[in-house]
Image: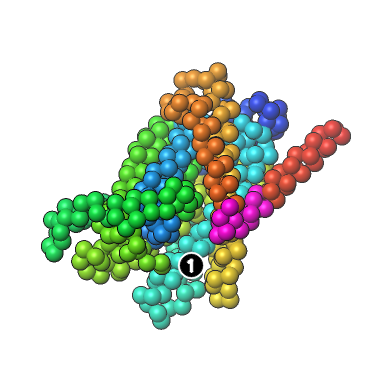
Amino acid sequence: MPSGASPEPAAPGPGPLGAGSGPLGAGPGPLGAGPEPLGGGLKQRHLTMLGLGGVIGAGLFVGSGAGIAVAGPGIVLSYLIAGALAMCVMRMLGEMSAAMPASGAFSVHAERALGRWAGFSVGWLYWFLLVVVLAVEATGAARIANGWAPGVPQWAWVLVFMVVFTGANLAAVKNFGEFEFWFAALKIFAIVAFLVLGLLAILGVLPDTDPVGLTHLTGDGGFLPHGWSGVVSGVVAVLFAFGGLEIVTIAAAESDDPVRSVARAVRSAVYRILFFYVGSMLVIVTVLPWTAQQAGISPYVTVLDSIGVPSAGTLMNIVVFVALLSSLNANLYGSSRMVFSLAERGEAPKGLLKVSEGGVPRRAVLASVAFGFVSVLLNLKWPESVFLYLLNSVGAALLFVWALIALSQLRLRRRIEREAPETLTLRMWFFPWLTWAALAGMAVVVVLMLRDDGARPQLLWSAGAAALVIAVAWAREWRTGRSASRC
């Protein structure tokens, strides 16, 4: 592609499967997947580590305490159930992305399967989710940094982080890959070290420790102190910690071999992530009684303190700090590629299609990071309340995204089998039954959130945001249809 050229979106046309228009007929290939104008640069090692570490964030290191409080040792089952649902979604995504790699990933798949309204809705909602979360993550990292250097105000740290990661994402996609590679490596090293130390403590091998066996798993009210209702409540508490898995399929479009890369990344990620999450929870509730966990304190810190690891709180603060910056970097990348894909399909301003010599959509990056810079001002005036409302408005949006991924996979799988079965290098397990089971699981989570006083506002705010985006999408469809009929 010529330097600085702006690719035009494919001309709308009638699409199969009831999709009024879309890129299905654009470009070469049996499914109309044209070549990506973005520059490559991501290696297999980048995608593998992104798949492994991209989902390991502050939600695991800090937020898991809330799940333990409602489920007790049964949190292990909560993570197994939530992880199984996340693995199913990841497998569906992997199947579609290996067959039809695209920078918009599931937004493109939704448009091809369900229509332009679906691609528009899931793309813009996911973009909004990412740009809000990256601003909140910058604020969280700034709070930690402010604790280390109180002389530097919190807003200044947010500004520093936004400038650094914006510069890295504007330069070249390999910069994003390298940042994520080393961030993920540190997070994985931290979890592996925690698992090893925890196992040694359970066996009584560490100094001043005695074997604990299964005492804490069966005592203190038993394995299910709050019954199965506690396990179910734990699923709601921990499910959203698995958000972020989707970005690896977006990144695969800019790898050297998209089809093979996404298949490998998905295969290596799903089992190991489940191992890290479930393994960590099993160690936490085995080393100490679940009642020993304190609100506001990371369960990891509590366990490390109990087995005599010096400066456990400081060490975990460093890990959480890295996890927040890693998520900020990944969300900035994912949001820029999502809005670029929307522009390619005529669902966002065409000015965002400008691409640098290195294949970086710089205007899309700047558009996605704009709210992050606005958050510098918000940190000056409303450091808490504004972000609370914004997070509520997008907190449960992940369920909407996952549901559309599942519905898209149900429709596209049949089409791929009919038109290009050789592209199915990665297949969803037990199709279509497991896909339907995953959709049923999401519906159960929605019902549980409606019944939970703490989760209900988040679900309702997110449902309102989703309804607004869908209404805009349908209004655009209606206006396009009227314009076409006049012609």
- Against 384, residue 203 (above or below) is above
Residues drawn in magenta: 451-466
Which of the 4 image quarters holds residue 45?
top left
- Against 292, residue 380 (above or below) is below
Q: Is label 1 in a helix, a strand or a loop?
A: helix
The answer to which of 52 and 446 lies nearer the viewer is 446
In the image as oriented, which residue stretches furthest toward the right?
486
Residue positioned 20% across, 51% down in the render? 213
Does any portion of residue 4 appear in the rendered image?
Answer: no
Q: Is residue 441 left or right of residue 188?
A: right
- Against 68, residue 89 (above or below) is above
- Give the total of numbered labels: 1
Please state which amino acid type lies under the numbered disc 1.
Thr
Residue positioned 46% across, 36% down in the render? 88
Disc 1: CA contacts within 10 A as few (<14), some (14-19) or many (>=20): many
The answer to which of 433 and 482 lies nearer the viewer is 433
In the rendered image, which residue does mark 1 sit on?
139
Residue positioned 41% across, 81% down in the render? 151
- Position in image of residue 369 (x %, y %): 54, 59
- Position in image of residue 30 (x %, y %): 55, 22
The answer to which of 172 and 96 lies nearer the viewer is 96
Residue positioned 55% across, 76% down in the render? 380
Label the magenta part by its dominant secondary structure: helix
Q: In this view, does 139 lie to the left or right of 80?
A: right
Position of the C terminus by quadrant: top right
- Position in image of residue 228 (x %, y %): 44, 47
